[in-house]
Amino acid sequence: MIFPMTMHSNQNLEALHAKLPNDRIKSCKKKLGRNYLARRRPLAELHHNFMPQVSRRTVQRRVFEKDKVRKHPATERPALAPKHKKERLEWAQKYQHLKTAEDWAHVMWSDEVAVAQSDGTRVVWVFRSPREKWHQECYEPVPTGSKISVMFWGCIVGGKKAALVPLYPDQARTGKKSITAEIVLDAYKEHLPRLFRRRWDRVFMQDNARVHTAKVTMDWLDEQGYSVMTWPPYSPDFNPIEQVWYMMKTWIGKHYPEIRALALGEERTKAAIIEAVEAAWEAVGEGYLKKLLESMPRRVEAVLKANGGYTKY
């Protein structure tokens, strides 16, 4: 015979939930905080291993919801070896004395970015019934064929835009279809002398991409007498221009959504991408760049706190 649950049994169940031992809660949180595999286990397994005497919903409420913890896709980044963490930590220790945006105003932050047709696009939501999934008005066109993109080199300094240059492969000159050190060096020769003339004590930042560390690039920088910042590996979170690229791609997705479905041929599509990127660059405000510059002391502090590990930036 099956007896209906009474108010008394409900109260007993709530009392059991309320008496969930705090030491068990702390133990579970400690496991999640320090254990690589525990963070990846299903909730049902954590429930079975730590608190089988109560409901799974109680575990979720007492252990996770109180601290606003829920399962997220793991952030994908290159694995940091101990030597990488050491170099990142040493970089932060070297510059931890720079405490204000003004202290960082002499650094010229540079980077390359590839902008493709699909960059910056977001999921498009439509109102439809289940039967209307494949109606013409309810699906979003996407480009077919090979992915068309354009590479750019950019630089910011002192909370201001310094340069943005599209980079074009030159197979006849370099023998390669990709962007080579010679192509990047052309951009350096065009813009760095002007930027260093304005303030000779500036420091040039570039990452460890092969086009930057190539002998032809480093020899020219040495010949000019430019100060080049030593850059640790796998450290895009140190470079504020990375946020500029993200903002620009988002802006393009909002203001130039038609680029995603263009089928005009490679040259005309690349011209459309360049037009959109230049418009996005113009839309980057100095207020935004100054906020990025002001974040540098916090970035350094975050690396020190993470002992060379990755940060939220």
Image (cartoon, rainbow, N blue to C red):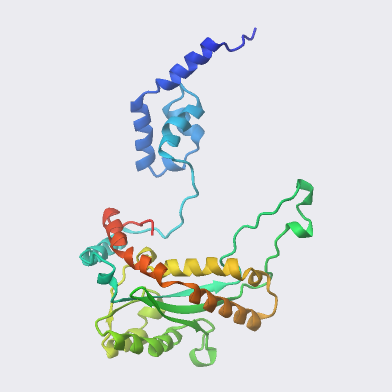
> Residue at position x 40%, y 72% from top?
286
Q: How many marks?
A: 0
In the rendered structure, the answer to whether residue 266 lies left or right of residue 189 reads right
Point out the image quarter for the N terminus: top right
Image height of 297 relative to 160, above or below: above
In the rendered structure, the answer to whether residue 229 lies left or right of residue 3 reads left
Comparing 80 with 227, the one in front is 227
Comparing 206 with 129, the one in front is 129
Comparing 117 with 183, the one in front is 117
> Residue at position x 26%, y 85% from top?
200
The residue sitting at the bottom extreme is: 173
> Residue at position x 31%, y 65% from top?
296
Where residue 182 appears, as percent x and y from the top left, is 43, 87
Residue 83 showing in the rendered view: no
The image quadrant that residue 155 belongs to is bottom left
In the rendered structure, the answer to whether residue 122 lies left or right of residue 173 reads right
Image height of 114 relative to 238, above or below: below
Point out the image quarter for the C terminus: bottom left
Image height of 48 relative to 112, above or below: above
Where residue 17 appears, as percent x and y from the top left, is 45, 21
Where residue 91 appears, as percent x and y from the top left, is 26, 66
Where residue 63 appears, as percent x and y from the top left, is 42, 33
The residue sitting at the left extreme is: 97
Residue 48 showing in the rendered view: yes
The residue sitting at the top extreme is: 1
